Image (cartoon, grey):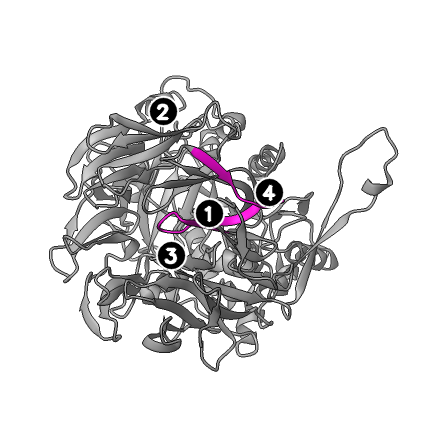
């Protein structure tokens, strides 16, 4: 899934306001929050949908930074040149490659370097496949020789990768792995696999559901010495197909019978309880041309979401996950002996989250690995030996780990991001690998993300909060600011002319006793004596967070400027508050979240400045599922609902995501049935706007179409729009503008 009860025993509602100067959180009453907002006395400019979509309110940023192995410099693509800069001074040190006046394409869309920095792999003419993967035309540039080598294929290639020593490049054509030897003058490639076939066998690239739910787009890895290539084979021949219909919408004055019929796109999509791809792991040896197969055990209904070569000579680590996704085994395959052994197992009663599965990091000394776990009730990092025995906890406490940036073997330190001063914020930290000397490196309160140099001597800190557009700074590994890279002060000034930013954070308590994060965006000219309508927005899916202290200025601010308060809350099941809070929705997706959003409606309606009869809800994907759940399972609370590309029945969705959080339908059919909006369609109350793409390969049109049919048979009035040939994102051409304009008008006219 993509691509967010009050304390009624007292007159005080414990909430927080962010001071834009000092960024401190001060407890105030709900009324004081809004009374303290400065109303505008002068006329302000109108926020428009066109300006938003054209990026007029977007903060500037820096893309495509690649650290060099010296740890003192990095490269950035500038036009069709790759320029090297100093971390410390920002000065230009060199032009690594200049592709002007060559046979290069006019636009290079991306590049990577080999670990030894002798070769550059770049691509152009990108053609998207699924969420992450794409086809493109790849070429290799030899930095010393200043010449280029195109990959020898008659069609575009998929997921090309250089070997660490720059001597080879692997790529996928026709679901088969090819490897070009860059040291050979013949410029010929070896085809490692030959059985690749559309909708049957994939070699080295994942099937649709792996890419969507494990977030991987490549399933092969070169060994560190370049002697071997390990890959996963996906046999999806037993996976059921789903067919999407595409329409030719062009009108011409010429007769062309070829465009009169739509064409069908068929691909493999495993729904809940259905067969998955059978996976196997193979290791190809370049010297002999031999391929061996790793023993993955007797259980075949498994997932292999990750391959990693360890720093132990010839040892490949394989992550194996069971169908229920509550047991993770780490296997070691030794290329010299051909034997596979299990050296670590993690078992959970509910599930192991996808980012935990992918968090394994093998230490360069070959003596152990790091992995994230919730064994103390919160997401933390632990160090284990290669015998699977725990050495120590590297991080502890309730400030959950968000992202792992890496380990500096020289200093024996790790760098990571975790919850900051509160769960709406993210900070950057370091800690000794022994678990001592945890230190916060980021100084500003809000959302901080880091991009470290290969030496871990420097990092770029990407910071923003609700009041401050993105600021990028180069810092050293103690957190000391070295130099500014960019700020968005001009954008801040510009936004003041639109009325400024009036987003405030607070907490409220549900009847269960949970303190839930929330925010409000109020009109620039807010008047506490008036009554305002409210649009509740969010996502509320498992381990997600929508209430974040980070900069956003978008269509929600447009609504606020037009007199609609926008509000959001992170319900039970969302992230950053520990395992129990996150996993309490297991087996019943939508149930507790619906309860919390129903109570949030009541909390909002109790505020003196809110018209409780005019509260609506909006959501996309899982958020759309929540909109429908509220209109049907808590009828009468929300005046209107907007559901974009919603799930309406979890039996229609893919198995990796759904079974992770719901279990198998054969074992939990009641949980599936009782939490499907489709079951409650006849109870719908309020105005509904339902929209979806006719070519949505993620949340299939089947969801919206089934729900619409149920509403028709129940004689329920609603509005629905189908967007021709559009996927889950519903974009392309004028589509985004049309869709957003439609549902914004729907809010303003009906709320």
**Frontmost residue, 369 versus 335:** 335
Residue 533 lies, in percent from the top left, at: 48, 39
The first of marks 2 and 4 along the sequence is: 2
- Numbered circle sitting on residue 184: 1
Question: Disc 3 versus disc 2: distance between alpha carbons?
Answer: 48 Å
Q: Is 711 or 727 nearer to us in this picture?
A: 727
Between the C-alphas of marks 3 and 4, the distance is 42 Å
Using a 10 Å C-alpha cutoff, classify the residue at mark 1 as few (fewer than 14 neighbours), some (14 to 19) or many (20 or more).
Answer: few
The quadrant in which residue 675 appears is bottom right
Residue 89: which disc? Answer: none
> Is residue 251 left or right of 611 when viewed as pictured?
right
Badge 3 marks a residue whose secondary structure is loop
Measuring from the top left, give residue 180's x and y in whole percent.
49, 50
SS at badge 4: loop
Q: Quadrant of the C terminus?
A: top right
Q: Considering only order in the chain, which callout, 4 or 1, is on the residue closer to the N terminus?
A: 1
Q: Nearer the viewer, mark 3 or mark 4?
A: 3
- 392 left or right of 490? left
Q: CA distance from mark 2 to mark 1?
A: 52 Å
Sequence order check: which comes first, mark 2 or mark 1?
Answer: 1
Write down the residue under mark 4. Answer: 730
The x and y percentages for residue 711 are: 69, 56
Q: Quadrant of residue 334?
A: bottom left
| Residue identified by numbered label 3 | 226
In the image, residue 738 lies in the stretch drawn in magenta: no
- Between residue 431 and residue 17, name the one nearer to us: 431
Between label 3 and label 2, give the one nearer the viewer. Answer: 3
Q: Which residues are magenta?
A: 147-170
Query: Which disc, if any, is residue 491?
Result: 2
**Marks 3 and 1: which is nearer the front?**
1
3 or 1: tag closer to the N-terminus: 1
- Tag 4: Cα neighbours inside 10 Å, few (<14), some, or many (≥20)? many
């Amino acid at each position: 899934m993509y691509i967010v009860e009050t304390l009624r025993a007292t007159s005080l509602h414990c909430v927080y306001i962010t001071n834009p100067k000092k960024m401190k959180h001060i407890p105030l009453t709900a009324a004081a929050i809004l009374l303290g907002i400065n109303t505008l006395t002068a006329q302000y400019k109108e926020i428009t949908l066109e300006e938003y979509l054209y990026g007029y309110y977007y903060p500037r940023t820096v893309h495509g930074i690649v650290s060099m192995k010296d740890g003192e410099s990095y490269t950035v693509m500038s036009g069709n040149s790759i320029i090297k800069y100093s971390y410390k001074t920002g000065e230009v040190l060199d032009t690594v490659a200049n592709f002007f006046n060559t046979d290069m394409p006019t636009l290079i869309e991306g590049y990577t370097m080999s670990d030894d920095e002798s070769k550059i792999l770049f691509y152009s003419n990108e053609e998207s496949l699924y969420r992450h993967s794409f086809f493109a035309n790849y070429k290799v540039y030899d930095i010393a020789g200043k010449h280029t080598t195109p990959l020898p294929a008659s069609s575009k290639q998929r997921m090309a990768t250089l070997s660490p020593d720059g001597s080879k490049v692997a790529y996928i054509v026709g679901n088969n792995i090819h490897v070009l030897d860059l040291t050979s003058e013949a410029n010929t490639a070896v085809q490692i696999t030959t059985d690749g076939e559309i909708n049957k066998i994939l070699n080295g690239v994942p099937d649709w559901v792996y890419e969507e739910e494990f977030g991987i787009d490549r399933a092969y890895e070169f060994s560190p010495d370049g002697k071997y290539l390990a890959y996963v084979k996906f046999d999806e021949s037993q996976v059921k197909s789903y067919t999407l219909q595409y329409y030719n919408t062009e009108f011409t004055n010429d007769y062309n019978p070829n465009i009169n019929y739509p064409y069908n796109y068929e691909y493999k999509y495993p729904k809940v309880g259905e067969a998955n791809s059978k996976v196997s792991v193979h290791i190809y040896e370049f010297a002999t041309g031999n391929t061996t197969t790793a023993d993955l055990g007797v259980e075949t209904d498994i997932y292999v979401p990750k391959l990693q070569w360890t720093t132990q000579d010839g040892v490949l680590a394989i992550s194996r996950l069971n169908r229920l996704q509550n047991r993770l085994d780490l296997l070691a395959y030794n290329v010299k002996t051909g034997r596979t052994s299990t050296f670590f197992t993690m078992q959970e009663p509910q599930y192991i989250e996808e980012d935990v599965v992918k968090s394994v990091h093998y230490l360069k000394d070959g003596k152990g690995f790091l992995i994230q776990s919730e064994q103390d009730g919160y997401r933390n990092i632990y160090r284990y030996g290669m015998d699977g025995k725990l050495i120590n906890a590297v991080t502890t406490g309730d400030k959950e780990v968000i992202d792992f940036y890496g380990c500096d073997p020289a200093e024996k330190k790790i760098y990571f991001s975790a919850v900051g001063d509160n769960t709406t914020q993210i900070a950057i930290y370091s800690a000794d690998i022994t678990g001592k000397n945890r230190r916060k490196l980021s100084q500003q309160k809000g959302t901080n993300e880091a991009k470290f140099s290969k030496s871990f001597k420097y990092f770029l800190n990407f910071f923003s909060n609700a009041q401050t557009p993105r600021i990028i700074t180069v810092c050293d590994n103690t957190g000391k600011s070295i130099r500014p890279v960019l700020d968005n002060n001009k954008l801040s000034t510009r936004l003041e002319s639109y009325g400024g930013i009036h987003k405030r954070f607070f907490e409220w308590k549900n009847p269960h006793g949970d303190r839930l994060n929330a925010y409000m965006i109020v009109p620039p000219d807010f008047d506490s004596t008036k009554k305002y309508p409210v649009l509740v927005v969010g996502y509320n899916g498992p381990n997600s967070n929508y209430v974040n202290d980070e900069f956003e200025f978008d269509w929600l601010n447009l609504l606020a400027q037009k007199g609609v308060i926008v509000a959001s809350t992170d319900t039970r099941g969302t992230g950053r508050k520990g395992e129990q809070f996150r996993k309490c929705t297991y087996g019943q997706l939508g149930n507790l979240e619906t309860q919390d959003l129903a109570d949030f409606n009541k909390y909002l309606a109790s505020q003196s400045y809110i018209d409780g009869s005019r509260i609506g809800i909006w959501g996309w994907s899982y958020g759309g599922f929540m909109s429908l759940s509220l209109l049907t399972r808590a009828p009468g609370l929300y005046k209107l609902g907007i559901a974009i590309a919603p799930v309406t029945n979890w039996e229609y969705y893919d198995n990796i995501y759904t079974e992770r959080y719901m279990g198998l339908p054969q074992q939990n059919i009641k949980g599936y049935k009782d939490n499907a909006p489709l079951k409650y369609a006849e109870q719908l109350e309020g105005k509904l706007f339902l929209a979806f793409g006719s070519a949505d390969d993620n949340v299939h049109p089947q969801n919206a179409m089934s729900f619409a049919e149920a509403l028709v048979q129940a004689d329920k009035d609603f509005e629905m729009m189908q967007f021709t040939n559009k996927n889950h994102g519903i974009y392309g051409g004028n589509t985004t503008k049309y869709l957003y304009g439609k549902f914004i008008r729907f809010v303003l006219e009906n709320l």
